[in-house]
Amino acid sequence: MTVPEPRPAEPAAADATTLRLGYGTNGFANHRLDDALAVIADLGYVGVALTLDHDHLDPFAPGLTRRVAAVGRRLEALGLAVVIETGARYLLDPWQKHAPTLLHDDPTRRVEFLRRAVRIGADLGAEAVSFWAGVRPEAVSPQCAWDRLVAGCATVVDAADAAGVTLGFEPEPGMLVQDIADWRRLYAALGEPARFGLTLDIGHCRCLEPRPVPQCVAEVAGHLVNVQIDDMRRGVHEHLEFGVGEIDFPPVLAALAAAGYRGLVAVELPRDSHAAPAVAARSIEFLRAAAATAADNHAASTLRSASVEATPGQGVPAHR
């Protein structure tokens, strides 16, 4: 099936320093949510990727309406924008990581979780609600898993349409939808819903996409609704602190700026909760420096281009 060209991106940002940096609460798993939000805001982040989990706005615990309202007030007081993430490991099943997914024989609890996430997103004014496919169970055939995924996503899309919420579907290495090509196939199978966008993890691009990371960003620019950022190495799905992996970040941030992306760019380091404040502080310093480098490179390139255009005799030689 041929997938139409993506919708045009918004006008390009002036430079990468205009990108809106956020941090994921899954990297603050040992903090109370109120404390995590305060630290994230105090460090200078403008948004938060809020993973719904046992200790962070559990969607199945009593008093949800009251707790959502309290988190909303807290976000507003701290000046934090929010996206909702749904990748909690053992929220739905204490024995099996991420189970059940939309691919399991009985996905009821996953569907209900995603519906609740959409409602929470609507109440908090979230910029996006992000979710993924899950790993295919061994007993489920590839075609059956695909059919279940499409049906489950259609249900979530209906809930998002009703609530006026944007969805960001994330390709995840090792899952049924693991790369951008898989996302395009799913997007087409669903009939290209207006509210079904793309959550792009920058590290995943380095891990398994066939193209350079900045090219990946450019090619999906019109579909981006949520960006996660972390370092990674080729072929290894391990979220690393910046500078530890193989990604050259100034060109990546420049690509996001050139794409006109206006959503959050949220640090995704779920295995670093033991040192969350220090890691978050190093991360924002690194990203600000990388953004400044990207902006300087852009300015220098623009100046060189202008200089060449203004210099007589350049380009095609004159006839003699």
Image (tube, helix red, strand yellow):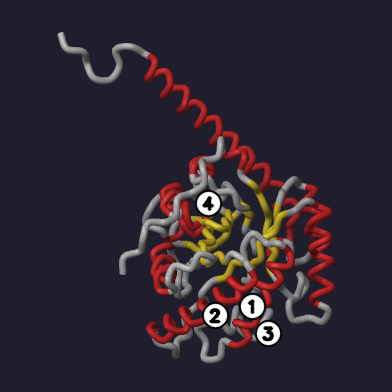
| Label 4 neighbour load within 10 Å: few <14, some 14-19, many 20+ | some
The kind of residue on which mark 2 rests is: Thr
Residue with the mark numbered 4? 245
The kind of residue on which mark 3 rests is: Pro
Q: Secondary structure at mark 1?
A: helix
Residue with the mark numbered 1? 115
Residue with the mark numbered 3? 94
Residue 9 position in % (x across, y down): 48, 49
Residue 311 position in % (x across, y down): 36, 13
Marks 1 and 4 sit apart, C-alpha to C-alpha, by 36 Å
- For the question of whether residue 268 can be seen, the reply is yes
Marks 2 and 4 sit apart, C-alpha to C-alpha, by 37 Å
Marks 4 and 3 sit apart, C-alpha to C-alpha, by 32 Å
| Label 1 neighbour load within 10 Å: few <14, some 14-19, many 20+ | some
Q: Are marks 1 and 2 in contact (CB under 8 Å)?
A: yes
Identify the residue at image location x=73%, y=62%. 28
Identify the residue at image location x=79%, y=76%. 64
Instruction: Quadrant for the C terminus, please.
Output: top left
The kind of residue on which mark 4 rests is: Gly
Residue with the mark numbered 2? 155
Any mark on residue 239, and which?
A: none
